[in-house]
Amino acid sequence: MVSVPPHGMNRYRASVSYDGGPFHGFAENPDVETVAGKLRQSLEKIIGHKIHLICAGRTDAGVHAEGQIISFDAETFDISKIERSLNKLCAPFITVRDLQKTNDLFSARFSATHRTYRYQILNDEYPNPFYHRFTWHVRTQLDLDSMQRAAQAVVGEHDFSSFCRKATILIDGKEEEASLTREVISIAVKSEGSFVEIWVTATSFCHQMVRSIVGTLVEIGKGRMDESDMSSIISKKDRNAAGPVAPPQGLTLMEVGYSDPKKQ
């Protein structure tokens, strides 16, 4: 349920890009620097009152974003002035753009219809110091055709227990296992020169889902697993059946989609 802003407040949204390397994830955590913490503290310093940030996707430590979306409620302010001030305070690792007043029922999280992530691999004999912050260096030559064919098994609605960390939710005061069923809309393995990109779009993702899928596809690309294994890995619903979790620095939240113009 999305509530409207309190009396005298407006709802705002913005697009956020960040280098996740220096941060302990997006979500706030005590005693460590996070993207949300830096954004919230900077905004509160500029506008002069407390705010609560909502985001489209809570990225892990070391994971980046090109098109993260945030929403928050605040008193009326000069948008261009606040955006400039915010970018000065958040530089150089965070950039805020397209700050705007939005619909009272908009939620960066709950109004989203899909999210798209890109995972970058440097598939070369030698590492590259200019790309190490944003790629996973894999020395073994990958069979991209096998990876692409195997990847199609994840498209559709599945229980992704084999690719996600288990999570719990509170229901009537009791801890219950959260559903790990998700719908993957599309996945593609692309390459340009020594760079391999894996693009995944889904309605939502569970924890470490993309990185676990990528780690498994890399095992297939190396020939350590067969491309036909992907379907059986999904059906086993066992984290031990899948490949390793790919490192965080290759992953970027690229885009968040919203379909209802009235909620944008």
Image (cartoon, rainbow, N blue to C red):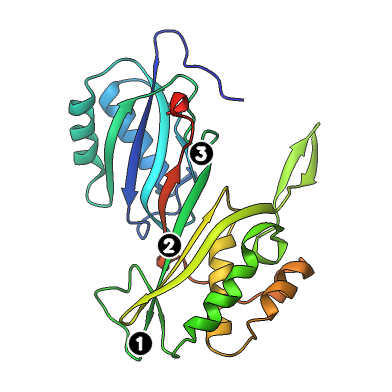
- Left or right: 237 in relation to 187: right
Instruction: Work out whether mark 2 precedes mark 3 in sequence or the reverse, and give the earlier one.
Output: 3
**Percent position (x, y) of residue 212?**
58, 68
**Percent position (x, y) of residue 82?**
23, 28
237 up-or-down from 79: above or below: below
Instruction: Work out whether mark 1 precedes mark 2 in sequence or the reverse, and give the earlier one.
Output: 2
170 and 229: which is toward the camera? 229
112 and 170: which is toward the camera? 112
State which quadrant residue 163 falls in: bottom right
The residue tagged 2 is 118
Q: CA gap, disc 2 to disc 3?
A: 18 Å
Label 2 packing within 10 angstroms: few (<14), some (14-19), many (20+): many
202 up-or-down from 173: above or below: below
**Amino acid residing under circle 1:** Asp
Q: Which mark is residue 112?
A: 3
Identify the residue at horizontal 18%, vertical 34% (top origin): 84
Q: Secondary structure at mark 3?
A: loop
Q: Secondary structure at mark 1?
A: loop
Count of numbered labels shown in the rendering: 3
Q: Which mark is residue 224?
A: none
- Left or right: 82 in relation to 69: left
**Amino acid residing under circle 3:** Ala
262 and 237: which is toward the camera? 262
The residue tagged 1 is 124
82 up-or-down from 242: above or below: above
Identify the residue at horizontal 29%, vertical 28% (top origin): 45
